Amino acid sequence: MITLLSNYHFPGNVRELRAMVFNAMALHRGGSVLAMDSFRQAIQKQQQLRADYPVAEPSDGLPIVIPGRFPTLDEVEEAMVAEALRRAKGNQGVAATLLGLSRPALNRRLARRVIQARS
């Protein structure tokens, strides 16, 4: 849970995190640990809203530098998946959320990479 929350930039700041926690507690059905599902669903919902209604967000100041040959889409996809897995510390569920994918969609991409590597 910490990895998922630490990689989400919370455009609503503390208020958004607070709302997520209150929602998770309202849906909580016992036990000592809050379920990740409500957090994951809230983050996916926000990512979908941003995709449907893009808003210009301030950049982090880092330009995208592409020296030499322009990469193919396959190369970019591979780099993005690798970076998401690195940031998620290998957790595929968190990496899928970072990429805006479902877990099965990420698994298909990873399987395709393995098949291509064997060819």
Image: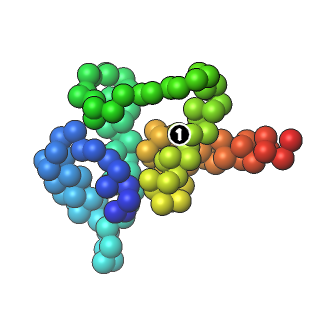
Q: Quadrant of the C terminus?
A: top right
Residue 41 coordinates in the image, percent (x, y): 37, 47
Residue 63 coordinates in the image, percent (x, y): 36, 28
Which residue type does callout 1 highlight? Answer: Met
Q: Residue at x 14, y 50 (%)?
A: 14
Q: Residue at x 84, y 47 (%)?
A: 118
Residue 12 coordinates in the image, percent (x, y): 18, 41
Left or right: residue 46 versus residue 107 is: left
Q: Residue at x 36, y 23 (%)?
A: 52
Q: How is the image coloured?
A: rainbow
Residue that badge 1 annotates: 80
Left or right: residue 41 versus residue 12 is: right
Left or right: residue 109 versus residue 102 is: right
Residue 93 coordinates in the image, percent (x, y): 50, 54
Viewer-proximal residue, 5 or 67? 67
Q: Residue furthest front?
A: 68
